[in-house]
């Protein structure tokens, strides 16, 4: 079975920024409490388990991102979702993604999507870029950098779309914060770049 979520431990390098070191142990993003050296970094990231590094092959989702919402998503398989850290709350996140050797800003929904009443927990990643084609079967690498809001239900599709657009605006702003912006150059994302 392929590894979708990188097995990892933390160490410090390139200044005070946490780095991912593959170690082959079957753990998911274990956190070393002394990795954060200032409250500034942890407050921007929003959680001791962030950033979280995730990778997987894009699978076909529910088919409503592009059609109903006009906001296409790359869906990661159930095996990736079930391997996410237990402390990673459901909700809307922002971060960076690597696809076809390029780095993109992203917004991700992790959870059950209350408006659609999903029966399965999902991770749906919206890359902040316009693509011409689908990319099912392609490898996607994601660094979840920060939390925007919890999941919630909406009274209408228009209300949901408005909230998603607000999430995108928040992500665009937060990804310019220096601590978070550095993540776009992380080696984890660059692996795809080296292969293209």
Image (cartoon, rainbow, N blue to C red):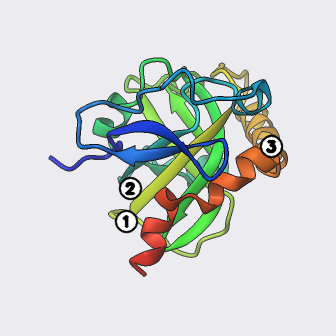
Residue 120 falls in image quadrant:
top left
Question: Residue 111 in the image: x percent, y percent?
Answer: 50, 26
Residue where numbered disc 2 is placed: 58
N-term mark: 1 or 2: 2
Tag 1's secondary structure? Answer: loop
Q: Is residue 154 above or below residue 183?
A: above
Q: Which mark is residue 71?
A: none
Count of numbered tags: 3
Q: Residue at x 38, y 56 (%)?
A: 58
Q: Residue at x 64, y 32 (%)?
A: 92
Q: Of circles 2 and 3, which is in front?
A: 3
Q: Secondary structure at mark 3?
A: helix
Q: Does 104 sit left or right of 6 as displayed?
A: right
- Disc marking residue 138: 1
Secondary element at image label 2? loop
Q: Nearer the viewer, residue 66 or 149?
A: 149
Q: Depth-wise, is mark 3 or mark 1 nearer the camera?
A: 3
In terms of depth relative to the viewer, which is nearer, 191 or 125?
A: 191
């Amino acid at each position: 079975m392929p590894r979708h979520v990188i097995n990892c431990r933390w160490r410090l390098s390139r200044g005070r920024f946490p780095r991912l070191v593959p170690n082959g142990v079957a753990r998911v993003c274990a956190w070393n409490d002394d990795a954060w050296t200032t409250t500034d970094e942890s407050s921007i990231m929003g959680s001791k388990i962030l950033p979280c590094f995730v990778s997987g092959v894009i699978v076909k989702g529910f088919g409503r991102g592009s059609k109903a919402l006009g906001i296409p998503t790359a869906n990661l398989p159930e095996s990736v979702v079930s391997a996410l850290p237990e402390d990673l709350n459901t909700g809307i996140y922002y971060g960076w993604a690597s696809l076809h050797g390029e780095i993109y800003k992203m917004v991700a929904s992790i959870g059950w999507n209350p408006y659609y009443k999903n029966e399965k927990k999902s991770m749906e990643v919206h890359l902040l870029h316009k693509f011409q084609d689908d990319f099912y079967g392609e490898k996607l690498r994601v660094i979840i950098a920060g939390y925007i809001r919890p999941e919630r239900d909406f009274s209408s599709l228009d209300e949901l779309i408005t909230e998603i657009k607000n999430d995108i605006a928040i992500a665009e702003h937060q990804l310019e914060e220096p601590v978070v912006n550095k993540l776009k150059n992380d080696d984890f994302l660059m692996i795809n770049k080296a292969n293209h």
